[in-house]
Image (cartoon, rainbow, N blue to C red):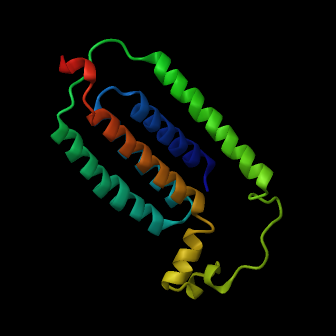
Amino acid sequence: MPDGLFIFFAALTLGAALLLVLSRNAVTSAMGMILALVGVAAEFFLLDAYFLGVLQVLVYAGAVMVLFLFIIMLLDTEDPQGAYPWKTAALGLATFFLLAAGVLWLFHWSGAVSAVKAGATPPELSVNPAEFTTAAKSFGRLLYTKYLLPLEIAGFLLLVALVGVVSLSKDNPETKA
């Protein structure tokens, strides 16, 4: 994988994720999430996982985000007035990094990530494209072994976007007076 392209798409994905989190406009946040999902799809393409990259663009960046955008536009959220709540954002960011460090420590402590290389490749995961089968078993095994982390990251980003949409849709009790 070309290192320059990897760094470019990783920076694009991280920048779009920051736009998603720091934007006060719901539509801008959704567009940032679409850009982040496209960046993850580009990383899939660089890993030669073309099917997963196309699924990422079609399913997540396409269908699911169109649904989110419709929900945001139907809710008619107004742009909040006032300054950005930096203290709340900093607290959320600190909580995220603390939880991420805890998860990494847990993975290291539990031995889930081994330093030992894997053994022989099963026939379903052969490198030879002529031996590749389209059976669901081989695809599922590949998805939940080699591409498990990108799949989990995409699911987590979808969950964060869903929680963000729900929190933006709630009415503020201060505005009901």
Residue 129 lies, in percent from the top left, at 57, 81
**Residue farthest right in this picture:** 116
- Above/below status of 23 relative to 143: above
Position of the N terminus by quadrant = bottom right
Vertical comparison of 96 with 86: above or below: below
- In the picture, the quarter occupied by the C terminus is top left
Answer with left or right where residue 47 lies relative to residue 109: left
- Which one is nearer the viewer's eye here, 30 or 83? 83
Q: Name the foreground residue: 83 vs 146.
A: 83
Vertically, is 130 above or below 174?
below
Q: Quadrant of residue 115?
A: bottom right
Q: At 59% across and 87% down in the image, what residue appears?
A: 131
Residue 35's spot in the image, x, y percent?
A: 39, 44
In the displayed structure, does residue 19 sit left or right of residue 129? left
Q: Tell me residue 4's x, y (percent).
A: 59, 45
Q: Please determine whether, in this image, residue 88 is positioned above or below residue 96.
A: above
The residue depicted at 23 percent of the width and 40 percent of the height is 72
| Residue plotted at (65% across, 81% down) | 126
Q: How many marks?
A: 0
Q: Depth check: give the residue in front, 114 or 8.
A: 114
* Residue 11 x %, y %: 53, 38
Q: Is residue 62 left or right of residue 88?
A: left
Residue nearest the viewer, comparing 74 with 27: 74
